[in-house]
Image (tube, rainbow, N blue to C red):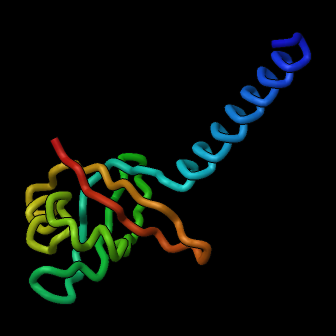
Amino acid sequence: MGLRVRHALIVSAVVLCVVAGALVAACNDGDRSVTGVITNVEALSLTEVDSFTVRGNNGETILFGVDPVAALDFEHGLVPSHLREHALAVQEVTVSYYVTDDDRFIALRVDHD
């Protein structure tokens, strides 16, 4: 293999890595998290959360909607009874979320220790 071919392959590999890294960073840029306590839960039914409010450790209060796909994942605590348990116990939780184009905060999961 000639020197020019090797050089072209190396340059192509570097460019590919840079592009892949940029795509991964862009996809992860939208996911955020906040740690605090749940102060309110609004339910649509026994199993479906309409919204809930978290007072972050930084003092900021955030109203969250629930991602439709995440609402089906009962393992990560997005059911009214589970969220209310944390609110009543004033137990610290971490909410992973994203912000929509119209500035709504949408919860993906709720974790606790």
Q: Quadrant of the C terminus?
A: top left
In the rendered image, residue 13, in percent from the top left (x then y), is placed at 72, 27
Q: Is residue 113 above or below residue 59?
A: above
The foreground one among 27 and 19 is 19
Q: Position of residue 28 (x, y in %)?
A: 53, 48
Instruction: From the viewer's perspective, tell me whether residue 35 is left or right of residue 89.
Output: right
Q: Nearer the viewer, residue 98 or 86?
A: 98
- Residue 48 at what x, y percent from top left? 19, 81
Q: In front here: 36 or 74?
A: 74
Q: Residue furthest front?
A: 1
Residue 63: x and y, percent?
A: 39, 71
> Viewed as shown, does residue 43 lie left or right of 54?
left
Side (left or right) of 2 relative to 87: right
55 to 12, vertically: above or below: below
Residue at figure coordinates x 48%, y 53% from the top left:
31
User: Looking at the image, which residue sits at the far right?
Assistant: 4
Q: Is residue 13 above or below residue 30?
A: above
| Quadrant where the image shows the N terminus | top right
Residue depicted at 15% across the width and 55% down the height: 90
Classify 71 as above or below 19: below
Q: Quadrant of residue 14?
A: top right
Quarter occupied by residue 52: bottom left
